[in-house]
């Protein structure tokens, strides 16, 4: 009992070391937003279990902090700073296997790349920050703590949504300031005042619009004073101007009467000349209209003939395609029959050999061969059905397409006929009637050809069904025959000695063990391929987001960095983590637009070296399963590494059942 208590206490001695850096982002908002970030000291960091503070610290002069989180429970790490939004991160220290926690060298750690604190903007929904932006959990594969990628992506989405809302607000604010300055320069004082007041209402307390507003009000006052001065000067000028205008009007009236008389005579002459020009123009337009109408009729006729030719060409292509598909289906069926015959001959030869040997091993091989033959027959049957279904679907699609094209052509022809009938009269009507008769004849011929095709298809389908029925009957007979042979062989096998049964059982056990190892290896490989595919998709997404972000115009908005960066680290006892957050060779950065949110990871040679070091350590200690996992991790970093492949082959041999 004392030993158990001592062991339990030992298992609880470890804690997770969480470290990060806290920065403060400040904005200078004028006609464009400008941000500045600096490390801050005195930020509060609390480890909470519900509302209870489990651990607490503050950031130092460089903004850095470290906090230790107890084992076997769920906690929230809350970072806060006066006047700023708080940031919350979840960490679960449960799920650490006992053999790992018992290791005296087990000193788990995780680094949150950085937390950026910023003041709140009015009208922005910050409720999403009440949830954890990152979830830190224990990962058995790396035997250390890391972020849950799904939870991290969700947290990044929350921060991005808030950042986008802030960007829109700042863009509107700065846009109003900029437009206000333009209006002020143009002396549009009321508009300038309105824009600066709008900016103040959007983000109260920002100095720029407050400083510009008095300029707009001064502009309004100066304009009002100028209007009053102009009003007094204009009153004196108005009286003198009235007398001058009266004399001017009397003289203008005399001139006007003389001009009107001359204009009347000139207008009469111009009217006669214009009438002559209009008559000539009408004659030319009539002639041009007749020419255009003739050209239109010729074009419509050519279009009709072209549509008919295209329809016939499409029908020919569809017929040729159907013939090729039929030929391909026949070829597939012939190959299938040949394969089935070869398989049947092979099964028969194996059956004779097995009967002659009369051993348990022969019986097992026969059963395996029968299973393969059944699976092959099922696959071939399924493939034939699939080919037939695809052929029918293609034929149906081709028929429907031709019908749609026909209906479209018919609709165009009908509309054309109506227009030509209205424009050209009786002669054009007779032409439309002839074209319609020709179209109907073509339609009848097409329907007749389609009906013949359908009848042909039905016959082919019936023949295929007959062949399939005969094939099923043959397969059934073969199966029954095989079953009888199996029963006879089983009766003979039962007469074998216990020694032969023991040998067969041993062979089967070895086979099962090999299959199990192969399946495990295949499952591991598949999981790795899926993970690599996900990582590749993630990197492609990051690259696209980076390109999109670089295209945001500089005048619209200054890049806004997302408040989370995550650095992935290996256990400190196995390999030294990459501590630099500025070396682009050791980090990957996820970007969205100009937004900064980075998940830093070890890459390339560093990751391979660490994995090989751990693998060799486990191999030397005869912990082959752990070594196998570490060598596979090294291969993922360097896929063609011969050393890792050689060690994995040795481990597979060592893990085979004795």
Image (tube, grey):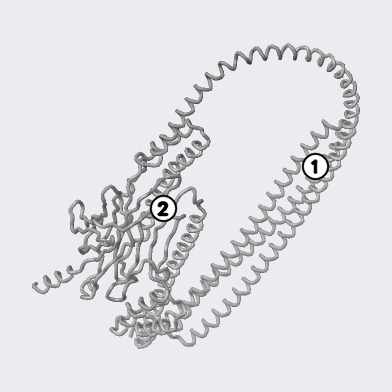
Q: Residue at x 40, y 67 (%)?
A: 587
- Whether residue 335 is visible here, answered yes or no, is yes
Check residue 560 in the rendering and tell me which mark sits there, or answer none. 2
* x then y, percent, for residue 366: 48, 79
The image quadrant of residue 259 is top right
The image quadrant of residue 103 is bottom left
- Whether residue 495 is visible here, answered yes or no, is no
* x then y, percent, for residue 153: 39, 57
Is residue 35 positioned above or below 289 on the image?
A: below
* x then y, percent, for residue 85: 30, 49
- Is 448 left or right of 486, judged from the image as shown? right
Residue in the foreground of this view, choosing between 150 and 421 = 150
Residue in the foreground of this view, choosing between 165 and 398 = 165
Where disc 1 sits, the SS reads helix
Single out the residue that lies furthest toward the left.
Answer: 2
Is residue 428 positioned above or below 59 on the image?
A: above
């Amino acid at each position: 009992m004392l030993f158990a208590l001592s062991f339990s206490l030992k298992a609880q001695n470890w804690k997770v070391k969480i470290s990060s850096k806290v920065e403060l982002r400040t904005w200078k908002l004028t006609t464009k937003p400008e941000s500045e970030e600096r490390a801050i000291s005195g930020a509060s960091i609390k480890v909470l279990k519900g509302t209870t503070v489990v651990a607490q610290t503050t950031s130092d002069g460089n903004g850095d902090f470290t906090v230790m989180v107890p084992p076997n429970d769920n906690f929230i790490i809350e970072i806060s700073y006066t006047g700023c939004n708080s940031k919350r991160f979840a960490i679960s220290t449960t799920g650490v296997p006992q053999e790992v926690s018992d290791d005296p060298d087990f000193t788990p750690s995780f680094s949150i790349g950085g937390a950026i604190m910023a003041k709140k903007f009015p009208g922005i929904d910050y409720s999403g920050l009440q949830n954890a932006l990152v979830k830190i959990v224990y990962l058995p594969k790396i035997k250390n703590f890391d972020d849950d990628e799904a939870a991290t992506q969700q947290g990044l989405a929350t921060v991005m949504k808030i950042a986008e809302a802030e960007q829109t607000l700042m863009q509107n604010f700065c846009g109003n300031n900029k437009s206000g300055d333009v209006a002020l320069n143009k002396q549009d004082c009321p508009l300038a005042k309105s824009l600066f007041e709008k900016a103040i209402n959007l983000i109260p307390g920002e100095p720029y619009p407050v400083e510009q507003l008095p300029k707009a009000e001064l502009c309004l006052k100066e304009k009002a004073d100028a209007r009053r001065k102009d009003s007094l000067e204009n009153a004196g000028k108005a009286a003198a101007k009235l007398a001058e205008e009266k004399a001017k009007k009397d003289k203008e009236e005399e001139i006007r009467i003389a001009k009107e008389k001359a204009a009347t005579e000139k207008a009469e002459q111009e009217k006669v000349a214009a009438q002559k020009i209009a008559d000539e123009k009408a004659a030319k337009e009539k002639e041009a209209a007749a020419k255009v109408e003739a050209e239109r009729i010729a074009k419509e006729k050519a279009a009709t003939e072209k549509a008919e030719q295209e329809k016939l060409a499409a029908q020919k292509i569809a017929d040729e395609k159907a013939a090729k598909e039929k030929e391909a289906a026949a070829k597939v069926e012939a190959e299938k029959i040949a394969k089935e015959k070869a398989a049947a001959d092979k099964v028969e030869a194996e059956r004779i050999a097995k009967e002659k040997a009369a051993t348990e091993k022969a019986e097992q091989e026969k059963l395996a061969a029968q299973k393969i033959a059944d699976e092959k027959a099922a696959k071939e049957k399924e493939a034939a059905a699939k080919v037939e279904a695809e052929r029918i679907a293609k034929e149906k699609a081709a028929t429907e397409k031709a019908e749609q094209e026909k209906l479209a052509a018919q609709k165009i022809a009908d509309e054309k006929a109506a227009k030509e009938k209205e424009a050209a009269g009786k002669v054009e009507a007779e032409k439309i009637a002839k074209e319609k008769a020709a179209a109907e004849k073509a339609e009848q011929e097409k329907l007749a050809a389609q009906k013949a095709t359908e009848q042909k298809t039905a016959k082919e389908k019936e023949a295929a069904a007959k062949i399939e029925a005969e094939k099923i009957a043959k397969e059934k007979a073969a199966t029954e025959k095989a079953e009888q042979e199996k029963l006879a062989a089983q009766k003979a096998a039962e007469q074998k000695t216990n020694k032969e049964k023991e040998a067969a059982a041993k062979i089967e056990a070895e086979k099962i063990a090999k299959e199990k190892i192969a399946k495990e290896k295949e499952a591991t490989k598949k999981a790795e391929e899926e993970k690599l595919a996900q990582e590749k998709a993630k990197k492609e997404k990051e690259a696209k987001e980076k390109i999109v972000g670089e295209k945001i115009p500089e005048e619209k908005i200054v890049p806004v960095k997302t408040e989370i960066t995550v650095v992935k680290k290996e256990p400190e006892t196995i390999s030294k983590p990459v501590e630099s957050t500025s070396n682009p060779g050791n980090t990957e950065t996820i970007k969205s637009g100009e937004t900064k949110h980075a998940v830093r990871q070890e890459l390339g040679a560093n990751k391979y070296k660490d994995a090989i070091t751990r693998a060799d350590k486990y191999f030397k200690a005869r912990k082959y399963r752990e070594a196998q996992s570490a060598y596979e991790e090294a291969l993922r970093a360097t896929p063609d590494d011969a050393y890792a492949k050689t060690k994995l082959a040795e481990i597979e041999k060592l893990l085979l059942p004795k």
